[in-house]
Image (cartoon, helix red, strand yellow):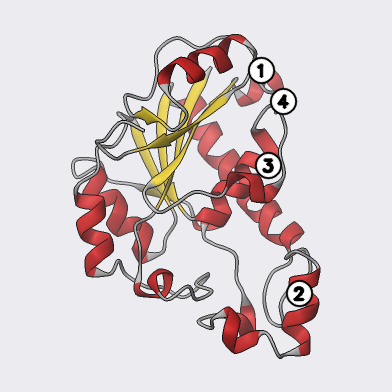
Amino acid sequence: MRTFYLIRHGRTAGNLERRYIGSTDEPLCPEGRQEISGLRAPEADRVFASPLKRCLETGAILYPRKEPVVIPELAECRFGEFEGHKFEELIRQNSYQQWFASCGMDAPPGGESREEFKKRVLEGFEKVRRLCEKENITRAALVVHGGTIMALMEEYARPRGDFYDYQVRNGEGYELILADAAACDRRISSGPCAGGSGVAVSSGAAHGAADRETGTNYQKISARNEAL
């Protein structure tokens, strides 16, 4: 079994203003950099990251001694014509209304559909898994985006949940336990897992331990120093 820490990047100016920031290559804003600097990251043997600045900067703060392996496929969804805009700026557009009504399944004009996005992300994650298997890496951190995390969790988390069930705040994410890619052909390991992330569990440590015993292969994590 291998442990993957899926960590969402720190806040950007677009995040603060609640804009659609997908392929836009924003850096961390001062508030985001300060918040991430106060976090305590789980120990990892290797760090993987989206190629976008907000993830690379977050990874450099959380793992200053580890050079990240950049996986282009792990970048955020491309929102096309909606990039950089807020809900209030888009709501009167027919194209946005149709996309919103589809719960994001349709492709925005010039952007990616949910299916296209998820397929890309899963291809990137397979690269991560194969490399971890080849180099016998047991703990890997992925510093990525909220959408990327949701796509991965929808595919691999057990019990299964919906895409939007796995939303996380900046600097938070999930500890995900999976069997080797070659051994299970993407089947999820449901056995108990020894050890932990070394970070706070959102629902409490006791709840996390109970989850492991019942076959749940993930727990929500926060790199923040306070107990949740």
Dot 1: within a 10 Å radius of its alpha carbon, few (fewer than 14), some, or many (20 or more) residues?
few
- Identify the residue at horizontal 45%, vertical 15% (top origin): 206
Q: Are marks 3 and 2 in contact (CB under 8 Å)?
A: no
How far apart in space, not on screen, are marks 2 and 4 (Cα)? 34 Å
Q: Say whether residue 126 is visible.
A: yes
Neighbours of disc 4 within 10 Å: few (<14), some (14-19), many (20+): few
Which residue is pictured at 22% across the width and 68% down the height?
A: 30
What is the three-letter code of the residue carrying label 3? Glu
Q: CA distance from mark 4 to mark 3?
A: 17 Å
Q: Nearer the viewer, mark 2 or mark 4?
A: 2
Q: For residue 147, what is the image quadrant? A: bottom right
Residues under labels 1 and 2: Cα distance? Answer: 39 Å
Whichever of labels 1 and 3 marks the residue nearer the N terminus, that label is 3
Say which residue label 2 marks. 99
Quarter of the image where the C terminus is located: top left
Q: Mark 1 vs mark 2: which is more N-terminal?
A: 2
For discs 1 and 2, the disc positioned in front in the rendered view: 2
Expressed as whole percent of the image width and height from the top left, the position of residue 140 reads 41, 32
User: Residue 42 location in percent, x, y?
Assistant: 32, 31
Q: CA distance from mark 1 to mark 4?
A: 6 Å
Which one is nearer the viewer's eye here, 22 or 225? 225
Label pair 4/3, CB-CB below 8 angstroms: no
In the image: residue 60, left or right of residue 175: left
Residue contact between numbered discs 1 and 4, judged by CB atoms under 8 Å: yes
Q: Residues within 10 Å of mark 3 (few under 14, many from 20)?
A: some
The foreground one among 36 and 155 is 36
The tag on residue 185 is: 4
Dot 2 surroundings within 10 Å: few (below 14), some, or many (20 or more)? some
At label 2, which amino acid type do we have?
Answer: Trp
Residue 162 locus on image (x, y percent)? 72, 44
Q: Secondary structure at mark 3?
A: helix
Residue with the mark numbered 1: 183
